[in-house]
Image (cartoon, rainbow, N blue to C red):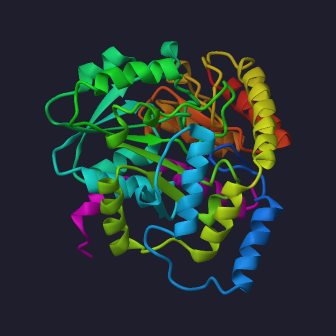
Amino acid sequence: MQLSSTLLRFNEPETLKMAKLGRELRAKGIDIVDLSLGEPDFDTPQYIKDAAKKAIDENWSHYTPVAGYLDLREAICAKLKRDNGLAYTPDQIVVSTGAKQSIANAVISIIDPCDEVIIPTPYWVTYSEIVKLAQGKIVYVNALLKNGYKITPAELEGAITAKTKLFIFSSPCNPTGAVYTKDELKGLAAVFEKYPQVFIISDEIYEYINFAGTHESIAQFESLKNRVVLVNGLSKGFAMTGWRVGYIAAPVEIAKACDKVQGQFTSGTNSIAQRAAITALQADLAPTREMVKQFKLRREKVMELIKKIPLVECSAPDGAFYIFPEVNKYFGKKDGKTVISNADDLCMYLLNTAHVSTVTGKAFGQPNCIRISFANNMKNIEEGFKRIAEGLGKLV
């Protein structure tokens, strides 16, 4: 069967692959502790679910505007003003079926074949694959553990060429949990001011899951605002992963372009999810703050547990719900039958032997690491790390 060569340009997300392998083992009766997926284990707050039920009863069951309901876009503008001090109008907002679609819309709208796209590593797995789909050329900038997995202005400027069209990053970062401070963003902004041809996609989906202080957006710098695409959504901060509601705030021209792209792919986002999203954005953030409080306790626990495992180096994340330890000192070791050559091997070893699912750092552009999620309850986290420690202890 001859299928499109487009399929050869990109890979299946490793995060979803590991989740699928875990499900397959679980279906065979094997007890798997899932520390791979980036999904809050909390349920959607009741008041948001009630809003969805009300929307069903009120017959919000018809096609929606491609960019989203006007009152939802107004609610997003109000949220951006309230939480971020950013002024946007509804015509600058496009609501999509998850932040992943928002990013895809923006990349497709901006990138032509051979345009260069700078992506700091480690990065979320989908950034590179969407750029490949758009036939852009990726320029990676390796952020180091010793620098908190954040790039410096000098490193950014060293990667920019006459062909650079776009820069994509996240703060808080998936997979490292790195959070850029205002001063650090100001340093990057000073570089971008020299290169007006470069657009910026700022993925802020983990905005609320921040252990370091106030969230800072690169969109706050007026000199850049006309080329920043701010990406956010409700999945992480409101425990609404399955509702699939993401959005961008961007210059009007980019918003219109994303509207055009989305109109040919999915049209408007689910009507009921949009009505619930309005309630989520307008309500008090107390449930979100409580969820973050629990994540902070888990963060403390995972750092305590990871420090007990030899040959592993790991920094404490300032945001999101992952740790990203360096595990390359285990490469070359074996348990008598399985040889660990790389992070891929280590993750498969932990899955098949320790029965814990993690994700290889190679998928995030850092082959010496693995990603471990603490978006799971404390009991499972403790059991998972116990199994990891025992599994690694068998390698010599």
Q: Quadrant of residue 273?
A: bottom right
29 in the magenta segment: yes
90 to 157, vertically: above or below: below
Write the residue at 63% across / 32% down: 319
Q: Is residue 9 visible?
A: no
Q: In the visual, does 170 lie left or right of 47?
A: left
Give the percent coordinates (x, y) of residue 265: 37, 72
Q: Nearer the viewer, residue 206 or 281?
A: 281
Q: Is residue 43 visible?
A: yes
Write the residue at 69% across / 56% down: 282
Write the residue at 45% across / 32% down: 218
Give the percent coordinates (x, y) of residue 322: 63, 35
Give the percent coordinates (x, y) of residue 32: 73, 50
Q: Tell me where the magenta segment starts and ends, as one range.
A: 1-30
Q: Which quarter of the rendered picture does the N terminus lie within?
A: bottom left
**In this view, which residue lies farthest toward the top?**
146
Q: Nearer the viewer, residue 308 or 145?
A: 145
Q: Nearer the viewer, residue 350 or 93?
A: 93
Q: In the visual, does 172 lie left or right of 384?
A: left
Give the percent coordinates (x, y) of residue 364: 45, 37
Q: Quadrant of residue 305?
A: top right
